[in-house]
């Protein structure tokens, strides 16, 4: 069992989808990641919240395998994000991103977290991601997520951190934007040339494409009738994926592929309710059942 250190946003989200609208939900990339990963492994969360983040809000982490001693609370407001989805959920518009307390945030990795064997740099300013890497002692596995906001706004900082990670976990549009390649296999190859050996491309309802060197593995999205809110699905995927990998004694091709299913199962469960709603009420049995759903969806006997 390898504990996972993660740094990223803890946020208040306002979300409008074709099935409803909610504001001031606890969210953030590191929040979705940590809660999903904690079903499989111990998680150490590093981030910052403002004075408006109350004990009531932090209850989403309570009773889970999540160590919050790296979560600072400082004067000011918590990160806020607002997104709105198109009628078929395929497009999302960001209406605002207010970094607030993240503007002046300096991640400080508690001494007892510095030897974490697995590190997940959730979507946040690449300089903060780099700052975290400079404070840890040669982890076995470093994974990173990012988004168009940073690909466009801070490309040099992003390149610097990419050169030091093993696994990139991004969505298809981001992979295309980062690489300048429309074709995803070529995009993954171009991203590997920037440093990472593994590229995981999230394709929303179409599933996931994984490249390990030149080897490909792909999983479809589980066809769901009742999608309510895709927010955080990418981070939840990353949590299930890295949580599962961390729970394995060694990383083999077989458990790597199983981890992709674990991530897909967690993400498919998460989108069935708003914000963290589905994850907070999830049981291990439901996760196991969803894993089996993926198995029956994709299994066939070769001729
Ligand atoms: P996803 O749907 O996987 O892209 O993740 C959505 C989560 O990412 C939301 O909970 C937001 O609070 C958070 N988020 C959105 N934009 C940013 C950003 N620029 N930096 C960090 N976190 C963000």
Image: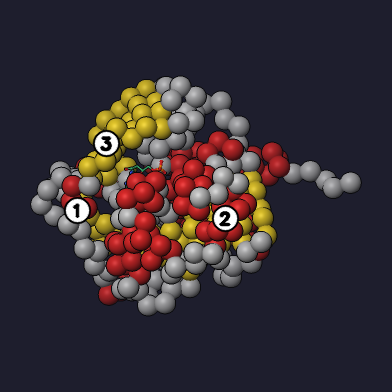
Measuring from the top left, give residue 268's x and y in whole percent. 52, 39
Depth check: give the residue in front, 216 or 157.
Answer: 157
Q: Residues within 10 Å of mark 3 (few under 14, many from 20)?
A: few
Residue at position x 29%, y 61% in the image: 128
* Residues at marks 3 and 2, CA–CA distance in whole angstroms: 29 Å
Question: Which residue is labeled 3 in the image?
Answer: 96
Q: Which residue is mark 1?
A: 103
Mark 1 or 2 closer to N-term?
A: 1
Residue 94, quarter of picture: top left
Quickly name the residue at label 2.
Answer: 188
Q: Is 118 placed above or below 238 here? A: below
Q: Secondary structure at mark 3?
A: strand
User: Which circle's residue, 3 or 1, is located before the other in the chain?
Assistant: 3
Q: Residues within 10 Å of mark 2 (few under 14, many from 20)?
A: many
Farthest bottom residue in view? 137
Image position, residue 241 (x, y; %): 52, 54
User: SS of the residue at dot 2?
Assistant: helix
- Tell me what residue is drawn at x 60 percent, y 46 percent: 183
Disc tally is 3
Which mark is first along the chain, 2 or 3? 3
The secondary structure type at the circle numbered 1 is loop
Q: Real-space Cα distance between discs 3 and 1?
A: 15 Å
In the displayed structure image, the side of residue 186 where residue 161 appears, left or right = left
Q: Nearer the viewer, mark 1 or mark 2?
A: 2
Task: Locate residue 262 relative to residue 111 in the image: left or right.
Answer: right
Where in the figure is residue 59, as x and y percent of width and height? 27, 46
**Could you say which quadrant of the image residue 131 lies in?**
bottom left
Identify which residue is drawn at 46% across, 39% down: 270
């Amino acid at each position: 069992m390898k504990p996972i250190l993660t740094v990223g946003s803890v946020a208040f989200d306002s979300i409008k989808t074709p099935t409803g609208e909610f504001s001031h939900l606890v969210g953030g990339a590191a929040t979705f990641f940590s809660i999903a990963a904690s079903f499989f492994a111990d998680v150490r969360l590093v981030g910052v919240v403002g004075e408006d983040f109350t004990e009531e809000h932090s209850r989403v982490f309570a009773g889970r395998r999540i160590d919050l001693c790296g979560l600072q609370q400082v004067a000011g407001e918590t990160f806020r994000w607002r997104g709105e989805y198109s009628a078929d959920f395929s497009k999302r518009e960001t209406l605002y991103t207010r970094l607030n307390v993240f503007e002046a945030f300096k991640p400080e990795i508690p001494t007892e977290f510095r030897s974490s064997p697995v590190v997940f740099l959730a979507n946040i300013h690449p300089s903060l991601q780099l700052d975290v890497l400079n404070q840890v002692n040669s982890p076995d596995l470093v994974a990173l997520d990012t988004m168009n906001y940073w690909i466009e706004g801070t490309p040099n900082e992003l390149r610097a951190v990419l050169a030091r990670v093993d696994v990139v976990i991004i969505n298809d549009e981001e992979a295309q934007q980062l690489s300048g390649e429309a074709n995803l296999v070529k995009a993954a190859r171009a991203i590997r040339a920037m440093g990472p050996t593994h590229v995981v491309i999230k394709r929303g309802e179409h599933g996931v494409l994984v490249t390990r060197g030149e080897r490909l593995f792909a999983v479809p999205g589980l066809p769901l009738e009742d999608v309510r809110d895709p927010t955080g699905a990418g981070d939840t995927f990353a949590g299930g994926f890295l949580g599962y990998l961390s729970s394995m004694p060694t990383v083999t091709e077989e458990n790597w592929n199983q981890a992709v299913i674990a991530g897909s199962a967690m993400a498919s469960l998460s989108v069935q309710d708003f914000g963290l709603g589905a994850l907070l009420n999830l049981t291990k049995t439901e996760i196991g059942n969803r894993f089996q759903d993926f198995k029956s969806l994709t299994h066939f006997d070769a001729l």
